[in-house]
Structure formats: structure tokens, C-alpha cells
Image: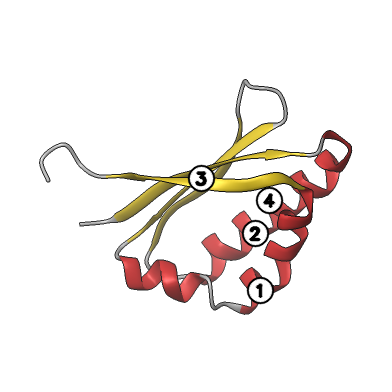
Amino acid sequence: MAFTFIARMKIHPEKRDTFVEACQELEKATLENEEGCLYYKFYKLRDENSYAVIESFENEELDEAHQQTQHFKDIVPKLMECLDGTYVREFLDPLDS
């Protein structure tokens, strides 16, 4: 079963450009360099200054490995500086599980 979740977050509005650039950089690096990544995409939510990322890996171990990659370690601090608070992960499981 795939390991899939959505992470929701709010950002400081004045940091939008930095945030979006870092999101795009992380998407590209993840999709190009990580085998076992099934889906990795950031979205702008309709609530003001709200964003989400949907991530799906073949298994939980690959998500843990993702967090240890050099591109993750280089890019995520830029994202975290933009957050107004923290993020919340919601896990998505297939209906038949």
C-alpha cells in the first residue's frame, strides 16, 4: 500500500515568492531524483495564505529516505522560514484498506 498524505500549511504573505520558488525547486528535485516517489505536488488552497503538498511514496521508508536527501535538507529550511505556524499532515488511505 502506498504511503500518501496531504500536508496543509499557512505562510506569511510577504514570503510568498520565496515559498513558491522553494516549493517548485523541491518538487522538481524530488520527482527527478527519488525512485519510489509516486506523486509530489504543491497546491495553493483557497483560504488566504494557505498551501498544501500531496506526497505519495511506495512505502513509508521511502518517505523517511526522502527526508534524508540532500535536496530536502537544502530546500526545506527555506520553506519552513515562510510558514506562519507549522504544518498538519493528514494521511490518505485507499477505501479498500
Residue 89 vs residue 35, the one in the foreground? 89
Q: Name the residue under label 4.
A: 23
Quarter placement of the N terminus: bottom left
Q: Which amino acid does label 2 sit on?
A: Leu
**First along the sequence among labels 2 and 1:** 2
Q: Mark 3 points at which residue?
A: 88
Separation of marks 1 and 4 at Cα, in angstroms: 13 Å
Residue 85 vs residue 82, the one in the foreground? 85
**First along the sequence among labels 3 and 1:** 1
Q: In the rendered view, does 66 fall on the left or right side of 2?
A: right
Q: In the rendered view, does 89 fall on the left or right side of 59?
A: right
For label 3, the SS is strand
Q: Quadrant of residue 90?
A: top left
Mark 3 against mark 4, which lies toward the viewer? 3
Q: From this viewpoint, which residue is outermost toward the left? A: 96
Q: Are marks 3 and 2 in contact (CB under 8 Å)?
A: no
Q: In the rendered view, does 39 fall on the left or right side of 87?
A: left
Separation of marks 4 and 2 at Cα, in angstroms: 5 Å
Q: Name the residue under label 1.
A: 73
Q: Name the residue under label 2.
A: 26
Separation of marks 3 and 4 at Cα, in angstroms: 16 Å
Tell me what residue is drawn at x 62 percent, y 20 percent: 46
For label 2, the SS is helix
Q: What residue type is labelled 4?
A: Cys
Mark 1 against mark 4, which lies toward the viewer? 1
Q: Are marks 4 and 2 in contact (CB under 8 Å)?
A: yes
**First along the sequence among labels 3 and 4:** 4
